[in-house]
Amino acid sequence: MTTTEKLYDALMRVPYAALQLFFLARELSGIRALIAFHPYAGGDWSFVMTLASRVSVVIFITVLLSFYVSRFRPTSKYSSWSPKITALLGTLFTYLLLLTPRAPADPFWDGLSTVLLFVGSTTAILVVVDLGRSLSIMPEARKLVTGGLYRRIRHPLYLAEEIAIIGFYLQFRSWLTLPILVIHFYFQIRRMDWEEGILARAFPEYAAYQQRTYRLFPRLY
Amino acid sequence: MLYRVLPVLVLGLTAALTAAAIEFLPETLYFPVVEYATPENIRIALFKNGEFEQSGCEKNAAKAASAIRASCPTCKVLERCARGLEAEHRKILSREPLSTPSVRLPGGKLTMTLSTSDPQLALGVCQLTERQSASLPVDQQMRCFPALVSR
């Protein structure tokens, strides 16, 4: 890879990383505001649960950011804009949630949110360990990974992300924010279509892998 | 191995960061405190939620102090901004029982402690404050907690 290519690749990572850093800073400030409003937790477990759910969001964004910054360069990608826009919308749509007001603190929903964010973030880390530095935002081919969590399903990272995002949504849980979640799901499914297309194009063995695996849920989808 | 260790690590990290936020973030905030003594020698201390900036805290403390001065011109009022929470301050803002009666707004937005040589008088003022705020909107209704009662 030439220096120019390396520089271009590094520069292309900046906007999305900056956006994630913006939301990370916003979430950290939100946690500080929560503490300012409730400076001493002493035995108040519902508050601890609310705080833990907010901390889980910070961990989730940090995990995504670190994966994104350290990934490989693609070996194959689409030249048209449509797959790129789909991928960007799929990724960015959920950040809109962070710009809407959160639902009032509730130990049940905040507890469930923490559990889902924990399961989602942990699974995402495990998937990325399998994936190595082949993580993509856009539908791009880097290296074909078929082992570990990819053995039975083709998109375990999407599954992990969606579990975390449902957990994330539970902190907002309103009719106003539900369309954001639904549109996000739509773009993620389209993103999987594009991703499978580019992988099939880049790796001849991908068709066989597709035949023996499910997309998201073993035996279901 | 990693599949077993990682969930424990993430869970541990979440718990550690949550505990660290509770323990250390108050140290980055400024807390308005207003103390005053009435002519009947009841010492009242008013504690409010934290502020990000010292200027905001000072403004908040001054606003509370001037409201007290307006309603009690003979009271001796002192306002200050505390950086972080001292152990006693933490206890007052927590749900733990205190040795004196205290009055609180819903959600602990504001806590007032009342101390005097006559515990019955302090309790009486506490209960009176609760009764007087009963006609206000719910978020401004104060609740009186006698001494040694969980709040």
Image (spheres, rainbow, N blue to C red):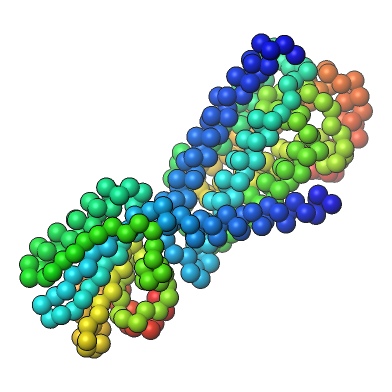
Which residue is located at x 78 percent, y 34 percent? A132
Quarter of the image where the N terminus of chain A is located: top right
Measuring from the top left, give residue B67's x and y in whole percent: 15, 61
Give the residue displayed 58% in from the left and 27% down from the top. Answer: A16
Residue A64: image x %, image y %? 64, 37
Asked whether residue A104 appears in the rendered view, the answer is no
What residue appears at the point 74 percent right and 17 percent down from the top-left corner? A77
- Res. A144 image quadrant: top right
Along the viewing direction, whichever of B32 and A176 lies nearer the viewer: B32
Locate residue A139, reporting x and y percent.
Answer: 71, 23
Answer above or below: position of B81 versus A130. Answer: below
Q: Is residue A187 above or below residue B135?
A: above
The answer to whether any part of residue B7 appears in the image is yes
Residue B118 placement, left or right of A92: left
Q: What residue sits 23% from the left and 57% below the top? A: B61
Can you say which quadrant of the picture contains the C terminus of chain A? top right
In the rendered image, the vertical position of residue B133 relative to residue B64, given as above or below: below
The reply, left or right, for residue B81 in relation to residue A213 is left
User: Residue B57: where, in percent of width, then height?
Assistant: 28, 53
Looking at the image, residue A190 sits to the left or right of residue B29; the answer is right
Q: Quadrant of residue A184?
A: top right
Q: Residue furthest left?
A: B73
What is the number of callouts on the image? Answer: 0
Q: B67 and A214: which one is in front? A: B67
Foreground pick, B124 / A220: B124
